[in-house]
Amino acid sequence: MKFNFELVDKIDLLIVDDGYSNFTPENCSFYLLKNEIYLINLIRATLYSLLKVEFSIKKIKENYFRDLIISFSPKIVLGHDMNGKIFRVKENFPNIITIAYQFGYFYEGNDKKIYRKILKNKNTDYFCVFDLRSKKFIGKIIRNTKIYITGSIKNNTNKIEMKKKMFDFLFISQFRPKSHEKKKNILISYDNHLMKKILIEMIEYCKKKKKKLAVALSSVRQDKIYYNYLNEEIQYFRNILNKIFFSKKNNSLEMANSSKVILCYNSNFGAEMMSIGKKVVFFALSKHAKFKFKRNAFNIKNLNGKKIEKIMNRILKLNQNQWHNYAKSIQLLKYDYKNKILNKLLIDIIKNEKKFV
């Protein structure tokens, strides 16, 4: 955690997603609230807590966050729906315009239950979502919000590049350490076991067909670095196969651009890559699978070696135009390169709304 000694300035837009989206707005002043300690605001929040006889870590954190918002005095605050910051802003500063954006892809079952719990009794002025299905679902939970279909704000900063293909297949890791199981109330051991089974089948296929397989690690991604499980993840994959390629750098997109086909179990990254034109095969092996479609020729629902071989052979043979036509028929999320929709919304709000005092 770094200390920031600067006095903050008043701005048009404050971004409270810890840099997750990599979003850079156009034609407005903005500031990204980083994972830093703003010392002047912390001192003020601590003194305020003492004066109010509310001296607890929880109260200091609450007052600190409020003091930051007051210091920046933004017209608009932008953040994703998972960390709760955007909803706290709206609750404490109802006159500030808030824009929430969808963090992750959800499909049926448990995903929807989680989202209902997160969004229950929450408010925001605008909500940017992945697709029409998300718009309908979120619109039933938060009724007084204007919803825009923008696709993934994070993914809209990505661009497919025509690079030399180093790998035939790139597997998107969903590895999580066992320590997350109790904290997050999710079936870590089960998911890790399924990934192992997928990789064993793919290793056999690649050996037979002389294809190259790589893994994009989860522990090096920006939103996962904080949990510090790189060494545990590396050991997990080395126990499956010693000679599998992976990188310790945060370059999943670069690896995807250097691969012919993306293999995805339950990762948002798979849906994001499909939206920008990459070939993607989804392994929908459990009832918890996000990407389980009735009509998807590249949706594997059981680990049958012959079926896997047939699907992999077929997707490798498809040219880009053939894949594009196929992907359009099952579009998972919208792709709005450079976030034109969100940028236009910001400009319109700044022009039409008076600054909160």
Image (tube, rainbow, N blue to C red):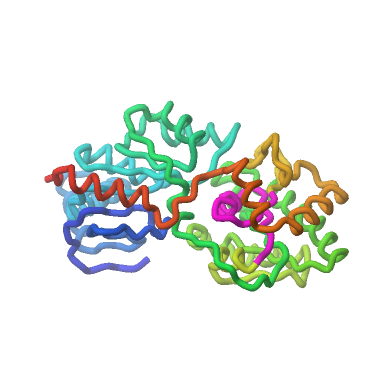
Residue 228: x, y in percent? 54, 63
State which quadrant residue 97 falls in: top left
Q: Would you say 70 lies left or right of 33 here?
A: left
**Total marks placed:** 0
Q: Which residue shows up at 79% across the image and 58% down it?
A: 202
- Please say whether residue 317 is one of the residues in the magenta stretch: no
Q: Is residue 21 visible?
A: yes
Q: Which residue shows up at 25% across the image and 50% down it?
A: 347
Identify the image quadrant of the C terminus: top left
- Please say whether residue 273 is one of the residues in the magenta stretch: yes
Residue nearest the observer in this picture, 83 or 64: 83
Q: Which residue shows up at 68% across the image and 63% down it?
A: 260
Residue 100: x, y in percent? 36, 43
Against 250, residue 198 (above or below) is: above
Q: Which region is colored magenta?
A: 259-281
Q: Residue furthest front?
A: 321
Residue 98: x, y in percent? 29, 43
Residue nearest the observer in this picture, 276 or 88: 276
Q: Is residue 55 visible?
A: no
Identify the image quadrant of the N terminus: bottom left
Against 35, residue 95 (above or below) is: above
Q: Would you say 225 lies left or right of 79 here?
A: right
Residue nearest the observer in this picture, 127 or 277: 277
